[in-house]
Amino acid sequence: MSSPVRKAAPSQTAAQRNAVVELLRVAPVADELADRFIAAGHRLYLVGGSVRDALLGRLGTDLDFTTDARPGQVQAILDGWADAVWDTGIAFGTVGAARQGTSCEITTFRADAYDRRSRKPEVVYGDTLEGDLLRRDFTVNAMAVALPLRDGEWRGRFVDPHGGMDALARRELDTPATPQQSFADDPLRMLRAARFVSQLGFTLTPRVHEAITGMAGELDRISAERVAAEVSKLITGAHPRRGVELLVETGLAERVLPEVPAMRLEIDEHHQHKDVYTHSLTVLDQAVSLEQDEPDLVLRLAALLHDIGKPATRRHEPGGGVSFHHHEVVGAKMARKRLKALRYGKDIVSDVAQLVFLHLRFHGYGRGGWTDSAVRRYVTDAGELLPRLHKLVRADCTTRNRRKAAALQRSYDDLEARIEQIRAEEDLARVRPDLDGNAIMELLGLPPGPDVGRAWRHLKDVRLDRGPLSRAEAEEELLRWAADNGLR
């Protein structure tokens, strides 16, 4: 089968060298697989994101292939070669396999038709590589490399009918077909565009930007779970702010996270306050800079959403001030509702909402007066979220006043020092009442039930206020509380 070959521009030389180096890393597995396809009378191509990532010098061990072989033929070719084979995507023409630590997904050429009412295509197998590449989302994902790749040979095997190499050199997203046709076929591609802006630092061509802006409402056809998966990849990308800004610019955010564009509050000359939307993007940037390991989805979502309660709580005060009383309470409820609507897991919903709820509590610390009891409650209420809360609170300092910013950071340094001091003395990670449920029931002569729970919670509050009690002190406190509450 002959394939069109684009001549490489001078600027592409480095990218091609990167690709050869990356492909040589996986060539043993890829070439072994290609040999088996050729022996069976078929062709095999590395395709899509794998080619893009090879050109960017970031190819991993998850490889995408396309072939003229039908799924049943692919399964037969893999028999005896792969360490494992799976057919979870076979209805869409995809067979998966693993060998020597490399995962492969092999998909038969496709020429799908869409009903334009959902994103589920009527699966139609194609006969040509060019037809398969035409139906892909973006030109940078519509390139292929014919295999096997002997000794890193590149010339003559690179298939790029839609200018994907040139687009990659410009870090630009365009579509092989018209963007209107592409997004009408699968509206999720619009969200994928924003995700690539975040992950890879790409920009959109004017026609793609215009099409997304005009077709944002089509995203309503997509399930919440698929939307959330793309949002998560966007938020954990290398440039999440750019991705969020694109969502807002194009109107996609109105369909996905409407609370974010709602933070763009009008500011008049008489009632000055920070632009909440820009502030939230800055907090997101600063939270990312405080991460130490992998991207933290929970922290980043909390940073983006921490002030979404402000529009609903804004009040104009006499004298030109603006207040947002209890916006953390309202915001926590809003964050919980939005993330549940996107079908995020319970842990993510709960953790993000709790961080939004707690993010303001520190701001009373700088005025002094925090007792050890207040510090204990801060730690106890944060629980396992405390390291993330530390980062969120520090990221939330966006004032341009250097003296004020430095004072806030010193105050939080002091709070963290106090936490560590009390933690060393009292093991704050496991604050519990000084008497357990069995001891409470024995001392008060109570059966299991709500009264035991009430007594337990009272002793925990005492523990937080006063620190550890001796056994005798705890028993005395319990008996006093029981008498006050008619239990003795």
Image: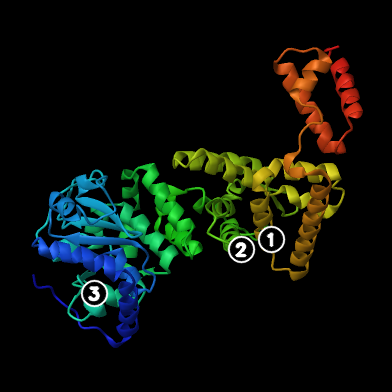
Q: Nearer the viewer, residue 72 or 267?
A: 72
Q: CA distance from mark 3 to mark 2?
A: 37 Å
Comes first in the chain, label 3 or label 1: 3
Residue shown at 76%/27% (left/top)?
457
Of the residues shown, which amino acid type is indicated by label 1?
A: Cys
Left or right, 432 with respect to 4, comes to right
Left or right, 68 with respect to 165, comes to left
Left or right, 104 with respect to 345, comes to left
Residues at discs 3 and 1 in contact (Cβ within 8 Å):
no
> Would you identify the image quadrant in which residue 276 lies?
bottom right
Of the residues shown, which amino acid type is indicated by label 3?
A: Gly
Q: Nearer the viewer, residue 62 or 267?
A: 62
Of marks 1 and 2, the one in the foreground:
2
Q: x, y (%) of residue 203?
A: 38, 69
Vertical relation: 344 (above or below) 77? above
Q: CA distance from mark 3 to mark 1?
A: 44 Å
Of the residues shown, which amino acid type is indicated by label 2?
A: Gln
Q: x, y (%) of residue 34?
A: 19, 65
Which quadrant would the C terminus be assigned to in this image?
Answer: top right
10 Å crowding of disc 2: few (<14), some (14-19), many (20+): many
Tell me the residue that label 3 is attached to: 163
Tell me the residue that label 1 is attached to: 397
10 Å crowding of disc 1: few (<14), some (14-19), many (20+): some
Vertical relation: 470 (above or below) 180? above
Residue shown at 9%/59% (left/top)?
127
Residues at discs 1 and 2 in contact (Cβ within 8 Å):
yes
Q: Nearer the viewer, residue 127 or 374?
A: 127
Tell me the residue that label 2 is attached to: 286
Quick check: can you spot residue 142? no
